[in-house]
Image: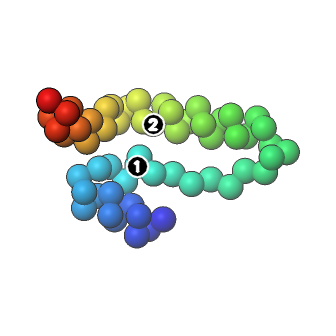
């Protein structure tokens, strides 16, 4: 994870866009909480910085 986060930062992507959690299949409420928390964090970060680059390449 540390190396992947450093690679993201090097590429101009916030390291916070990568997250790993260990949740058992028996812990469905915890999994839902993890997803919702991560979605909220991503919304705060806004669109991916690569999104604009991709659109430029497609034009």
Q: Name the residue carrying label 2.
A: 41
Residue 14 against residue 59 in the figure, above or below: below
Residue at the limit of the structure toward the bottom, as seen here: 3
Count the labels in the image: 2
**Cβ atoms at labels 2 and 1 below 8 Å apart:** yes
**Residue 41 point in image, percent of width and height:** 45, 36
Q: Name the residue carrying label 1.
A: 16
Residue 21 against residue 2 in the figure, above or below: above
Q: Which of the 4 image quarters holds residue 53?
A: top left
In this orientation, does residue 52 appear?
A: no
Q: How far separated are the C-alphas under marks 2 and 1?
A: 8 Å
Name the residue located 41 percent from the left edge and 64 percent from the top edge. 4
Q: Label 2's element?
A: helix
Q: Give neighbour class at mark 1: few <14, some 14-19, many 20+ (Cα, 10 Å).
A: few
Q: Give neighbour class at mark 2: few <14, some 14-19, many 20+ (Cα, 10 Å).
A: few
Q: Which of the 4 image quarters holds residue 37?
A: top right
């Amino acid at each position: 994870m540390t190396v992947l986060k450093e690679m993201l930062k090097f590429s101009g992507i916030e390291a916070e866009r990568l997250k790993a959690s260990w949740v058992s299949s028996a812990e469905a409420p915890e999994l839902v909480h993890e997803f919702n928390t991560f979605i909220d964090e991503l919304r705060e970060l806004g669109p991916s910085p690569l999104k604009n680059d991709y659109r430029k390449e497609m034009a």
